[in-house]
Image: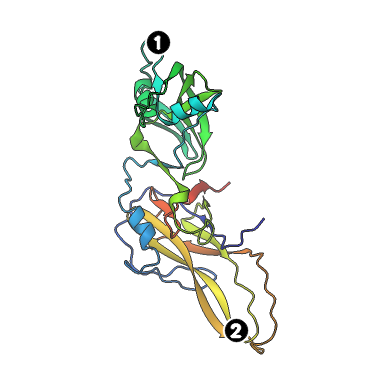
């Protein structure tokens, strides 16, 4: 079902060059003609630029919608509350320490990154611990498991420290990657409904261009200006923000008082753009600051 909002899918090219600071206005070739990037401080992309201003590129962490923890169901409300409060007892005997590095299977290929041991993962379980008087949950054992998760660079198979816990119906999993290599973000913390400016998926092309799919031009009513949509891009050293603007055209022949039926079943038109420099490790974002997932073209 199509969204009742602007659907914007971005096809982004990945590269390894780092961009300089804020890029100035530049022509963006595409079917809508020449579009000028908004200058710094122009307002329309300021929120996204500010949100990702300090995003590190070395090491470049993966971004997860929410934290990529997986919690099992619990057999009692009391057990659920204990888990939410970070009340856990360690398993008998020492917690496993290795391996020192783990492999993350990313869309671009495997990446070896430093790992955290089970002890550090156990402390992460207890990060919200508070003395409530509730009985802690007993950890029975710890395993190293892998599963696929969503990241801002597409699906990735990542290692997790999996804790088998009494009163739980399954494992509680904590990322085994060093925290410098991943971050969680909460989509509900962003203003505006998803889909108004950008869809949450993107595909990168091989030729260095970005193809964006903007809401198709609305059907104009007689006597009213025709409106077309053009892409707007802001680039900084840490983020590329993609949005759109409405550009009014000439009035359509006819009387303004004529009845005019318009559909809310909007489609999408492709617009081909080219970044000033390759995307690299920068975040691809919509104007509200939501990361847009970048995956490789098939």
Q: Nearer the viewer, mark 1 or mark 2?
A: 1
Instruction: Assess disc 1: are there few (<14), some (14-19) or many (≥20) residues with their C-alpha within 10 Å of its C-alpha.
Output: few
Q: Give the labeled residue for mark 2.
A: 224
Q: Is residue 233 left or right of residue 217?
A: left
Seen at 53% across and 55% down, the residue is 199
- Left or right: where does residue 133 sit relative to residue 71? left
Query: What color scheme is it?
Result: rainbow
Nearer to the camera, 5 or 273: 5
Above or below, 244 relative to 121? below
Q: Return the residue nearer the eye: 166 or 220.
A: 166
Side of 240 relative to 206 (left or right): left
- What percent of the width, then of the height, locates residue 66? 46, 41
> Could you tell me if residue 277 is visible in this image?
no
Give how far across and how far down residue 172 sits, in percent: 48, 26
- Residue 96 picture quarter: top left
Closer to us: 93 or 182: 93
For the N terminus, give its image quadrant.
bottom right
Residue 295 position within the rendered picture, expressed as x and y whole percent measured from the top left: 51, 46
When the figure is inspected, residue 180 is found, relative to residue 223, above or below; the finding is above
Q: Secondary structure at mark 2?
A: loop
Q: Which residue is pictured at 36% across the width and 22% down the height?
A: 117
Q: Is residue 80 visible?
A: yes
Picture disc at residue 292: none
Q: Quadrant for residue 235, please give it.
A: bottom left
- Residue drawn at x 60%, y 84% is 224
Percent from the top left, x then y, of residue 140? 46, 15
Q: Disc 1 on helix, strand or loop? A: loop
Tell me the tag on residue 92. 1
Q: Earlier in the sequence, mark 1 or mark 2?
A: 1
């Amino acid at each position: 079902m199509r969204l009742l909002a602007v659907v914007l899918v971005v096809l982004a090219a990945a590269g390894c060059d780092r961009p300089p600071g804020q890029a100035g206005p530049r022509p963006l070739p595409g079917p809508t003609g020449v579009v000028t990037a908004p200058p710094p401080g122009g307002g329309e992309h300021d929120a996204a630029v500010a949100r990702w201003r300090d995003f590190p590129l070395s090491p470049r962490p993966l971004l997860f919608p929410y934290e990529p923890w997986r919690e099992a169901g619990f057999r009692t409300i009391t057990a659920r509350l204990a888990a939410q409060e970070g009340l856990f007892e360690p398993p008998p005997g020492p917690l496993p320490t290795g391996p020192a590095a783990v492999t993350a299977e990313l869309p671009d290929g495997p990446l070896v990154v430093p790992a955290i041991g089970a002890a550090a993962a156990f402390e992460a379980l207890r990060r919200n611990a508070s003395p409530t008087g509730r009985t802690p949950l007993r950890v029975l054992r710890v395993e190293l498991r892998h599963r696929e998760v969503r990241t801002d660079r597409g699906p990735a198979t990542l290692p997790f420290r999996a804790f088998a816990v009494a009163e739980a119906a399954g494992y509680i999993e904590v990322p085994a990657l060093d925290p410098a290599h991943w971050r969680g973000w909460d989509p509900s913390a962003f203003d505006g409904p998803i889909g108004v400016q950008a869809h949450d998926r993107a595909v990168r092309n091989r030729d260095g261009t970005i193809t964006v799919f903007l809401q198709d031009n609305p059907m104009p009513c007689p006597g009213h200006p025709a409106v077309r949509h053009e892409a707007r891009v802001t680039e900084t050293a840490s983020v590329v923000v993609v949005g759109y603007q409405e550009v009014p055209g000439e009035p359509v022949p006819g009387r303004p008082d004529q009845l005019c039926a318009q559909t809310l079943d909007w489609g999408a038109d492709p617009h081909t753009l080219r970044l000033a420099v390759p995307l690299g490790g920068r975040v691809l974002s919509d104007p509200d600051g939501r990361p847009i997932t970048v995956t490789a073209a098939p």
